[in-house]
Image: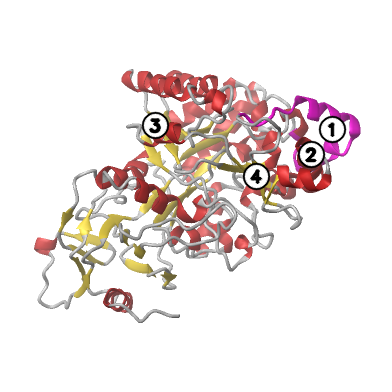
Amino acid sequence: MNQPPSPLADALRAALGSPEAPVRITGALVLDGTGAPGTIRDVVVRRGRILDPAAAADPAAEEIVVDASGLALTPGFVDIHTHSDLTLLSDPVGHSKLLQGVTTEIVGNCGLGMAPLGAIPLPALRGVNSYLDRDPAVVADFPRLTDYLDAVAEVHPALNVGAFVAHIPLHAAVTGLADVPSTPEQVARIADLARAAIADGAVGISTGLVYAPLCFVDESELVALGEVAAETDSLFAWHVRDYIDELEDSVEQAIRIAERTGCRTQISHLQSVGRRNWASMARVLARIDEARARGLDVWVDMYPYLAGNAPLSQLLPGWVQSGGNAAMIERLRDPASRSLARAQMVAPPGSATTDEEIMIAACPDPAIARRTVADVAGSTGQEGIDVILDVLAAHGTAVQMVTHGRSREVLEEVLHHEACVVASDGSAMDPEGPTGREATHPRSYGCFPRYLSEHWEDPADAVRRCTSAPAARVRIPDRGTIVPGAVADLVLLDPDTLEDRATYLEPHRYPAGISAVIVGGTPAAIEGTPTGARTGQVLRSRG
């Protein structure tokens, strides 16, 4: 049954229809994003900016008053680790992100991205980036990063969008997709492409050393990218080589590059997977603390869930993935190569078998999607590892998994670390459109409501980790705070009803408790429904 319009909704719709009128939001607990304690005070918005309430009175302008008593008013959430590169071109509203309060998405993470497109065929690049690619109708031919950003601007997104330049297309454009080390000349060309992308507006560089062909690169290429990040004051974001048994060495590599080059460093979705590795997180955080004490700019990000989401092909040895998706499938269909791959695969840590912690989330075969590997194995009489190999041989990188094996205590240790910001690692999706056809991780719909509802004991700090702190990491000015002069990206939420309602089996569910989302001073969503306003901006760095 439809709910009758509320006074809050009526006032916000009046503001939507009167873009020049000043809007005064009253009665809300204002958490301004700086980490300062919340206060109940007025916030005035006009022409997309926060005004000083004391100086905002204009006898000639009739204010629209929005009574937000009982609600909290925060800056819009700044999600600096997302994979919405192509989904936003399919769904410019960005439903799953907008309706959880995200007003800024930073794409191009984990080394995954579609620009710049070099000499390799576009289908091959799409194949290694299939994690991003949920709508085949989306055009993805971007010779330069600026072409990608222009394409985003042309669809008029409802939220703001910035981008890292991703390492996979940089490396593929010069060296290709095979297990071939880059020569010094090729490394220099890769660095030049990264430099050009930052000049085009990238906020930084991302790498993903678990993904082919990046699992084949040596440290000289990472040093070259770190040097570009340092000279342009851009962020270097790392999906490190391993989050399981070699987590400590993997984080050490990122710190080593930071120390050698001076680049600002972000370690993405920091986690330790498997019971046998949980104790390593204390040592990893201590190492990060030591680096920061020496003046290195090293931060981390994480999402508030005990399961991750990645391509199922991530379980394969690197050599199997050399050359791209088609080559990988061919090897898995060859009995000798498959047998060797099977022998080299490692069981997920924390489980007694190879499969009990893995759910096939997205798969072109509906008979397998949203089922655990153990369940499929039980119904077919196979071992779990053979189910995995069969599915990958049939569908390649199009298959995604949800994996468990994490500790609540370790997660909270990371989320409370002084250098941690909250980031979803999810994508903007429309459950009614092409991007909502397959299962995903609930973080795409509920990351920020989940985090805030679970950490409201210190709301000022929790909001800071979702707003001003991530905005500062990617050097986005005028966002992430509620101060005079800032862009009016705002969220009204009800702390008493705030809830992530998405689940691993039913991930396409919107959260509760988000009353309104305002982007650039314009209401973009009111009481769980997009308004149709698409006032988001493409945020280009000044590199």
Residue 389 is tagged as 2
- Residue that mark 4 sits on: 401
CA gap, disc 1 and disc 3: 39 Å
Residue 8 forms part of the magenta stretch = no
Label 3 sits on a secondary structure element that is helix
Q: Residues within 10 Å of mark 4 (few under 14, many from 20)?
A: many
Label 4 sits on a secondary structure element that is strand
Q: Residue at x 54, y 19 (%)?
A: 249
Whole-percent x, y for residue 458 in the image = 26, 44
Q: Going by the image, does 246 lie left or right of 463? A: right
- Tell me whether the residue at label 1 lies in contact with that at label 2, contact meaning CB atoms closer than 8 angstroms: yes
Q: Is residue 172 above or below residue 499?
A: above
- Tell me whether the residue at label 4 lies in contact with that at label 3, contact meaning CB atoms closer than 8 angstroms: no
Q: Say which amino acid is labelled 4.
A: Met
- Tell me whether the residue at label 3 lies in contact with that at label 2, contact meaning CB atoms closer than 8 angstroms: no
Q: Residues within 10 Å of mark 1 (few under 14, many from 20)?
A: many
Residue extending farthest to the right is 335
